[in-house]
Image (cartoon, helix red, strand yellow):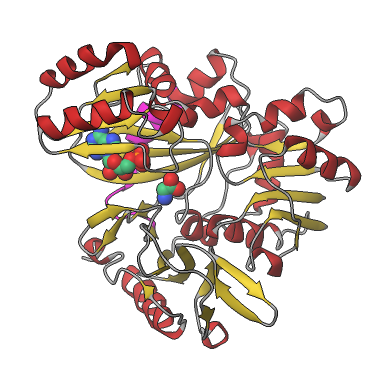
Amino acid sequence: MRILLIGSGGREHAMAWKISRSPLCEKLFIAPGNAGTALCGENVDMQPNDKEAVGGFVRSNSVNMVVVGPEEPLVKGLADYFAADEHLRRVMFVGPSSEGARLEGSKAFAKAFMERNQIPTAAYRAFNRDQATEAREFLGRFSPPYVLKADGLAAGKGVVICTTRAEAEQNLDEMLREGKFGEASSTVVIEEFLDGKEISVFVLTDGETYQVLPAAKDYKRVGEHDTGANTGGMGAVSPVPFADDEVMKRIEERIIQPTIGGIRKEGIDYHGFIFFGLMLVDGNPYVIEYNVRLGDPEAEVIIPRLESDLVELMKAACNGKLKDCAPVISPRYALAVMLTSGGYPDAYQKGYVIEGTEEVDGSQLFYAGVQQDVDQLVTSGGRVIAVTSLADDLEGARSISYTNARVVDFKGKYYRRDIGKDLLK
Ligand code: AMP
Ligand code: GLY
């Protein structure tokens, strides 16, 4: 099979690493890819949002399967573009239609979907620009902290949590009236604050049925002990010790099954991954958000635990045959530490030489912001490298990842030293 993977982060390096090991994969292209994906296949200089370019490449290179890593091309209708073309519709496409992608692309749509399908989530209301006064009043229904969410995609920055009413009102004005997140905040969701433990749960679905993939815990804040700014993710652990069989059963019954049921009932075309961002409140799961893709850095810990052939699973998802394809998951622990550029998630420098990657022993490096510059590797993003290790226990995985996090070096390197620490017995 000839496969095109779209994206350029650590998640895509992990996906490319796994796909390239499949006996079903004859040739792998990654667009645009990075220095890590280049080790697994051929990078193609093409913008993921350029539908005509992607379609043209698939046609002229006889690609049989397209796998989309990030959400943006899906929200912008790449799957619909393929479905509308006589030739391209025969290509297996991993990723939902734009309607399915609204589960991530519009928080108001996702909340209404959950309401229609009785899926537990925080109480909420959505407000548009003409309803700014009502929105301010609605804040009075809650006690602090207040949760405000820009409706649309805002590069992971669209959620604002405010500790006082005054701060919430000011942010609300900035979002609705002043376009703080551009068009994305022309509608704002105000919702109840849920106090609990967060977990990322993943499934692969063919729109009818699903298979559960390993769950993970992501460390979103830049600082140790979960302090400081929100980032794309500073590290991840899988499995998650507090998500035992009982909790996972509740998640399946109360969240996953009604979500897949809703997709089926509402006739949404969905072949691909669903990422459930959940809050466990006293062991009861609530949906914080849906994403229509794998997480980053969650992919860097769940993919190494997947013993089954990912290409075979994705093929089954495209062909509606997922029911008979239960994935085999390793019981081992995976832990990823994200090495970042100093300053991230605010301003940071790029172009620093990365050293020591060849001395890494026992970990898998997944490159995020890494570029090849003639004969050396240089930093090219805020999140630079995920250092993933597998071991029989969490302590072991932590120790190997941290040893190698010290071995890899570049100017300004920063990483959290407490990934997985809270989960140790
Ligand atoms: P998101 O950008 O949607 O991933 O949200 C960022 C973070 O905000 C989440 O990871 C949660 O930690 C937090 N968050 C979002 N919604 C809520 C909520 N209703 N209650 C508590 N925390 C929330
Ligand atoms: N790590 C969170 C995300 O991928 O959205």
- Residue 258 image-quadrant placement: top left
Quarter containing the C terminus? bottom left
- For this rendering, which residue is in front, 77 or 65? 77
Is 193 displayed left or right of 188 in the figure?
left
- For this rendering, which residue is in front, 349 or 34? 349
Residue 285, image x, y percentages: 29, 34
- For this rendering, which residue is in front, 204 or 121? 121
Query: Does the stretch in magenta take in 208?
Result: no
Q: Main secondary structure of the magenta part?
A: helix
Residue positioned 64% across, 68% down in the render: 35
Residue positioned 25% across, 27% down in the render: 172
Residue 184, image x, y percentages: 43, 29
Q: Is residue 167 visible?
A: yes
Is 221 displayed left or right of 32 in the figure?
left
Q: Looking at the picture, does residue 290 appear above or below residue 349?
A: above
Please report the bounds of the magenta region as a residue range: 238-258
| Total numbered labels placed on residues in the image | 0
In which of the image's four quarters is ligand 1 placed? top left
